[in-house]
Amino acid sequence: MEDYNRAGLAPFLACKCPRCGKGRVFKKSILSLGQFSDTYDNCPNCDLSYEPETGFFFGAMYWSYALIVGTIITGGIAMKFLGLWDYAIGGIMAFLLLNIPIIIRYSRMLMLYVVYPMMYKEKFYGHPMDEE
């Protein structure tokens, strides 16, 4: 059985498999608004199942929430320092609405890159991991 390591930052940003870093995670382009979050069942390169259990990606809601709150706080601080505080609510909301596909995609990627290797070690690494 092959021994896998986790992929790095470049495959994460390119939305590639968290194990091999080569296979695509999403079926369609981010510009296909109806299906931008559809994922393949398995990695075409290393055959890693992208959904180790039913409902795995429901956890991405928490990552989305964190990314949205972080964007609101950062945007509010930036607007205050730029002297655009009067436009903060509209500007931040417009920014968030335009970036919803990115937020949803990277929330799913965070589930695959952070949660998957921690909770499903045997499925991710291909062999049982020794507990310390």
Image (cartoon, grey):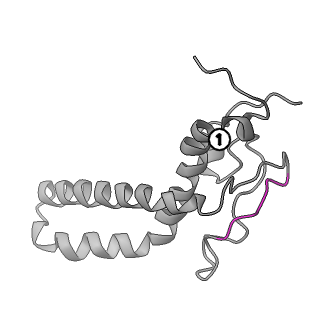
Identify whether 129 is placed above or below 53. above
Q: Which stretch did the figure color magenta?
A: 38-44
Q: Which quadrant holds residue 87?
A: bottom left
Q: Horizontally, is 12 left or right of 19 in the view?
A: left
> What percent of the width, then of the height, locates residue 51?
68, 57
Q: Residue at x 62, y 73 (%)?
A: 36
Q: Nearer the viewer, residue 83 or 132?
A: 132
* Nearer the observer, 111 or 131: 131
Horizontal arrangement in the rendering, residue 18 relative to residue 66 (left or right): right
- Tell which residue pokes out farthest to the bottom in this image: 34
Vertical relation: 6 (above or below) 83: above
Residue at image position (14%, 66%) is: 84
Left or right, 116 with reference to 4: left
Q: Main secondary structure of the magenta part?
A: loop
Label 1, secondary structure: give it: loop
Name the residue that disc number 1 marks.
Answer: 120
What is the quadrant of residue 122 in the picture?
top right
Asked if residue 79 lies left or right of residue 31, the reply is: left
On screen, residue 6 above or below 29: above
Q: How many marks?
A: 1
Q: Amino acid at mark 1?
A: Tyr
Image coordinates of residue 60 in percent, x first then y, are 49, 59
Classify the position of the N terminus by image quarter: top right
